[in-house]
Image: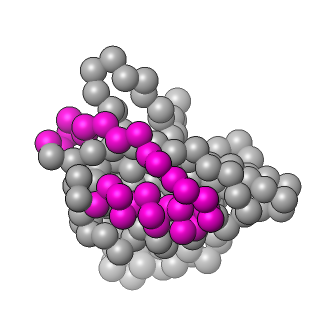
Amino acid sequence: MTTRGVLYVHAAPRALCPHVEWAVAGVLGVRVTLDWIRQPAAPGTWRAEFSWQGEPGTASKLASALRGWHLLRFEVTAEPCATAEGERYSATPDLGIFHAVIGLHGDILIPEDRLRAAMLRARKGEADLEGELSKLLGKPWDDELEPFRYAGEGAPVRWLHQVV
């Protein structure tokens, strides 16, 4: 069984670009050449998108391979398939990695124990419930990555989520 997904490298310093390609190639087991373009949201950085196909769990392996580079902003998505839910990984230098399980219709699926833990922290006064739920939905990562998702003037915009 295979799934497919997309790697979005939102911002990488030029010197890091070949290392990103090598890391992705190491996970996928094939040579990878990304089409890098300048990232106007962070001068001096580059961005690329790469569609991939692999076994369920490949998104996790890609995120793990890329997570060690502090100056890298990226997202990895995987579509649901017959044997696995979809996934989304988002990473920023300041926030680290966010992981979400994505259901068949594109919704983030939050496990019951994580919801209960958020409610407990809020009940104890350790956290604000809205803030906790915001983190569970990945809002801080979305807020930080949004300026990087747009490639530049005239480029197509790919929204990873849209709430109506």
Q: Residue 9: x, y in percent?
A: 39, 50
Q: How many marks?
A: 0
Q: Residue 46: x, y in percent?
A: 27, 45
Quarter of the rendering containing residue 125: bottom left
Q: Is residue 95 above or below residue 74?
A: below
30 falls in the magenta region:
yes
Is any atom of residue 36 visible in this view? yes
Q: Closest to the observer: 147 or 56?
A: 56
Quarter of the rendering containing residue 113: bottom right
Left or right side of 104 for 38: left
The region drawn magenta spans 16-43
Q: Residue 91: x, y in percent?
A: 38, 61
Which residue is at a point 37% across and 23% down the rendered structure image? Answer: 155
Q: Quadrant of the N terminus?
A: bottom right
Q: Closest to the observer: 116 or 13?
A: 13
The colour scheme of the drawn protein is one colour
Q: Closest to the observer: 121 or 39?
A: 39
Which residue is at a point 42% across and 79% down the rendered structure image? Answer: 121
Outermost residue to the top: 154
Q: Is residue 14 above or below residue 64?
A: above
Is any atom of residue 100 visible in this view? no
Which residue is at a point 39% across and 82% down the rendered structure image? Answer: 124
Q: Residue 140: x, y in percent?
A: 34, 56
Q: Is residue 62 above or below residue 104?
A: below
Outermost residue to the front: 31
Left or right side of 161 for 79: right
Which residue is at a point 42% across and 67% down the rendered structure image? Answer: 66
Left or right side of 5 for 39: left
74 falls in the magenta region:
no
